[in-house]
Amino acid sequence: MNKDLQAIVRVLPFVRSVAARRASAALRVRALLRNLAGTGRRLARLRRDVSELLRIDPLFVARDAAGFRRGEDHARLHDQLAQHMQMLEAGGGRMRLRRFCLCCNETTPMRMDLEASWEDVEGNRSPNWRERLVCGHCGMNSRQRLMAKLVQQAARERTGASIYLMEQVTPIFDWVRRLPGADVQGSEYLGYAYRGGDRVAGLRHEDVMALSHGDASFDVIVSNDVLEHIPDPAAAFRECFRVLRPGGVVLATFPFHADRPATVVRARLAHDAVEHLHPPHYHGNPVSADGSLVFQDFGWDLLDVMRQAGFADAACEVYMNDAYGHLGAGLLVFRLCK
Ligand SMILES: [Zn+2]
């Protein structure tokens, strides 16, 4: 054996042991990384579980005007509103609060200002608590954050829930679509030229007065500020009842005039033309630059219309929760049970 070979044979065990140590270190690093990834996944899962455990419940539930007034007094809704107004005035009409967003699952900055505010009959500026308090992370306002959470709660009570939203281009739809284990469908009203179920640029067209879905298709139906734009809301409620499964629920928001016993019809369809009974009033529409005409200013008789459509219960839930960033005069959500 020459000298070089002898030298190689001598260092060989050392080289082997270094290589072995390196391999085992690499294995340990890989295991550590795997573990870290697992911990990250476990943390994400834990966070999701915690978010599902957090609930929001109404301050009170009313089924008529008298019940609403009793609830308002008992919950001291006006006192709370006065406090929130003072906070806003102290900030010169704008404030940035840190509150827990139930959709982001963490404390986030929420923006409140006088955007979308209006002047009341006495000339006072009324801040739009419902459409503001925008979360700095998810970008959803108070009404949207509340509805998204309520849909999560309703879905959680129904395993593998099938959910239909009368919207498809909104932050609520995007948020609900990501709920684990839920089957989520949405639609937009794209115009009278289309038939229910038609797809245009990825959007499904539906007329909520004549849905193309089969009977008992959904466990949860969600309607956000749509029904005031429907010429015949009774037909829309009958359709919701038809496509809802027994035990299902409709969650709906719309501008509601809690001080009015009766609905005011602002416009109606007569011979395929719109007849205005009051000056026309439009709301913004995410799929039309023209906006959406308001056909009705709803009052308490709407709950009778809901019950006549077949619903076993129709109730107005009133939410306000400082910790979750729902301030102001109370957010109204209507819950219809089949
Ligand atoms: Zn958020």
Image (cartoon, rainbow, N blue to C red):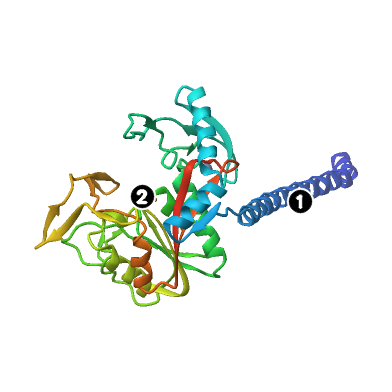
Q: Quadrant of residue 120?
A: top left
SS under mark 2:
loop
Q: Which type of secondary structure does the marked residue at label 1 adopt? A: helix
Q: Check disc 2 and report the residue beneath it.
A: 257
Q: Which mark is residue 27?
A: 1
- The type of residue carrying mark 1 is Leu
Location of residue 113 by image quarter:
top left
Residue 221 at what x, y percent from top left?
41, 64
Q: Which amino acid lies under the numbered mark 2 shown in the image of this protein?
A: His
The reply, left or right, for residue 255 in relation to residue 71 is left
Q: Is residue 103 visible?
A: no
Q: Nearer the viewer, residue 206 or 5?
A: 206
Q: Position of residue 317 (x, y in %)?
A: 49, 56
Pointer 1: residues within 10 angstroms few (<14), some, or many (20+)? few
Asked if residue 89 lies left or right of residue 274, the reply is right
**Mark 2 or mark 1: which is in front?**
2
Give the residue displayed 18% in from the left and 45% down from the top.
Answer: 280
Q: Which badge, 2 or 1, comes first in the chain's sequence?
A: 1
